[in-house]
Image: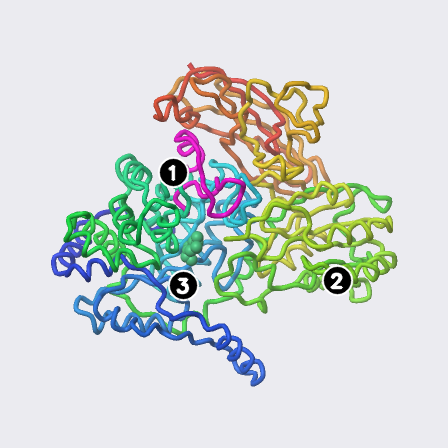
Amino acid sequence: MEEKIGTYHHLDPATEAHVEALLTQMTLPEKIGQLYQTTPFGPFDLDDYLAKMKQAEETGTPFEYDPQLREDMPDLIRTGRVGSFLNVMSPRWINTLQRLTVEESRLHIPLLIGGDVIHGFRTVFPIPLAESCTWNPTLLEQASRVAAEEASASGIDWIFAPMVDVARDPRWGRIAEGAGEDPFLGMAMARARVRGFQATNLTSGRRIAACPKHYVGYGAAEAGRDYNTTDFSERTLRDVYLPPFKAAFDAGAGTVMSAFNEISGLPATANPFILRTILRDEWNWPGLVLSDYESVRELIPHGLATDLKDAARQSLLAGLDVEMVSEGYTRHLADLISAGEVPLALVDDAVRRVLRLKIQLGLFEHPYLDETLPERLHLREDFRALALEVAQESMVLLKNESHALSPTTLPLSPQTRVAVIGPLADNRADLLGCWALVNHPEDVETVLEGLGHYLKADALTYTLGCPIKDDDASGIPAAVAAAQAADVVLLVLGESADMSGEGHSRVHLGLPGRQQELVDAVAATGKPLVCVLMSGRPLVIPKLAGQVNALLAAWHGGIRAGRAIADILFGAVNPSGKLTASWPRAEGQIPVYYAHKNTGRPSAEAGTKQFAEAFKSVYMDTPNSPLFPFGYGLSYTTFEYGGLQIENPTLGLEDTLIVSATVSNSGDRAGAEVVQLYVRDLVGSVTRPVKELKGFQKISLQPGEAQVVRFEVPVRELGFTGRNMGYTVEPGTFKVWVGPDSTGELEGEFTVS
Ligand code: GLC
């Protein structure tokens, strides 16, 4: 059966009648209650948590931490003064809270439970930046559906994802949560995730609403520092940051979360241009706008609001429906309405969107959960198998060069004696990545455990070398000795999970701690070096990349990362991942991304130091190009590109560009290749990027097999935001490339008349 995907845009009469019937009965406090989202628990008591965990360990009993309910919470719920909660993951608690409203409140309006299910729930997948490197929207839809299955079983009906912020600055820790630097790829991933989250036949019998975030432009934080100012043109807003949100809404997303950041002076949470003009007037999107965590109150430190009442007033007037955690609405909306500063009609509109969503999610018919379902559903074998598949496809082979031992260093032979060295080889917690909502390191397979499927115990040694980030080099001599005794060294290095994600921006993006010193010492042995690099972002590793013979970007790969890495290292899986964010040569290059402008003084020789090029847009000390470009990734086989065909090189505005190329597998083993199509609009009424991704197809080829890959791009999709800020497609000459990454391979030209 074709899986129906839920959308929340249909305003069907029965739902609307139900909404209106409720609304007319509601008192003002009950209306305002629907616009208040908070956590039901009191302040987290860490000492109590740790004491109970210790007790569970000592008595060998399962550890279930029972947080304390806020004292005022039962009464707030009974009197309808709270509408939703965030990050409650216990079905028992959710049923308890639901009973308070469904059975004891006046109008029995059920609660919405939201949660940050960013890359899996109990079955933790690779971080989203890694998942995007699969270039496989179908796989991501499946992964999102698994996340929805597990989250829904635990009572979450509102997933605060996908994070669709285009990010071109790896200093920004939240680059880990998104799909990288490109809007076109970001749109494909946004659609896939919304479809997966909003699948209609979940085992729980319930539904989930997706919540693309953070609307909008959060990834443009100045200097890559989280929560920092963003200041970009309306054209950049429309051509770079908005498209993935529009794709998410077109896929049916029922809600959106406003961002913390200001956009050129106006914080997103109180910005009528993005919340009303674009969302409602231009896009006619009827969904629900949720603030980010206390982003209403944050209007005060932003310097936009004098106090919480003023913040609430500006947010509601701008178009914010539900306030997360801060209490501007719940404390001040009644006064603002009676003072005539906020029209009741706007509050009613916001309440309608909340009620509509609750009705569409089926919460009135099914407010309660089957508390036994998580046990039966979580970590199901097919879910774990999918997590392995996603991890395998997300890893990117950045280098695989010859060494005295063999023409290529990878794949390794099981007869090889391997010295495994590094702080992430025998690690579980960090492989979960920056945002595993339910954190179970015990579910994670380590790299060592993965290697155990291929190497006998006597063929493998392990030494820590040095910790991830502490200043301790005492383990380096033992690592060097282990290297000398082995045929090949496998370095497993990188960042800990808490070095990326929210509030974790960095300016030094090289190997943390004493890891580079470890590499230097081990490299001096002259042994072949393979490096598995785990991170939540592109790293700045020019020296490491030069020292190793093979380099695999493994990101933080989730609960199956260890096995996936071993499958790739020993050739059971041929890597197919491709980068979705450029890897800089130096922090000083940032932001470095492929879809840049040409400038009036472009460098002539991309990729080499341009000392000779005086007075061009170049650096004195580094090439302009990144160390590894967008779209780049190697395979254990080789692919040849040829036979570029442009079926109709002269096109009208209503035509479709049809480009094809022949891709062949010229190596000796099967492999998957992401064939990419880029265009360039050579001259426009405004300057245009030197390249823009407009198509990609992931194909699998047997050795010797060739396939004609065909792209169809409607000319309408070659437009941009023109001088009048409207979307426009202009006649002119375009270049087109088909190739394995953004550096292009086959080049052609066509014209639009
Ligand atoms: C956080 C994040 C947002 C998350 C929300 C609820 O601060 O910015 O992504 O959904 O608060 O946890």
The quarter of the rendering in which ligand 1 is drawn is bottom left
Give the residue pinned by disc 1: 265
Mark 2: which secondary structure?
A: loop
Where residue 65 appears, as percent x and y from the top left, is 46, 75
Image side of residue 89 versus residue 108, left or right: right
Figure label count: 3
Mark 3: which secondary structure?
A: loop
Which span of residues is magenta-colored? 214-243
Q: CA distance from mark 3 to mark 1?
A: 31 Å
Residue type at mark 2 is Leu
The furthest residue to the bottom = 59
Pointer 3 or 1: first along the chain: 3
Mark 1: which secondary structure?
A: loop
Q: Identify the residue at image location x=57%, y=80%.
A: 57
- Decide: few, some or many residues near mark 1? Use Cα within 10 Å; few <14, some 14-19, many ≥20: some
Give the residue pinned by disc 2: 464
Give the residue pinned by disc 3: 87
Q: Identify the residue at image location x=58%, y=38%.
A: 674
Viewer-nearest of discs 2 and 1: 1
Q: CA distance from mark 3 to mark 2?
A: 36 Å
Where residue 17 appears, as percent x and y from the top left, is 15, 53
Residue type at mark 1 is Gly
Q: Is mark 3 within 8 Å of ligand 1?
A: yes
Q: CA distance from mark 2 to mark 1?
A: 48 Å
Residue 627 seen: yes
Pointer 2 or 1: first along the chain: 1
Q: Is residue 722 above or below residue 319?
A: above
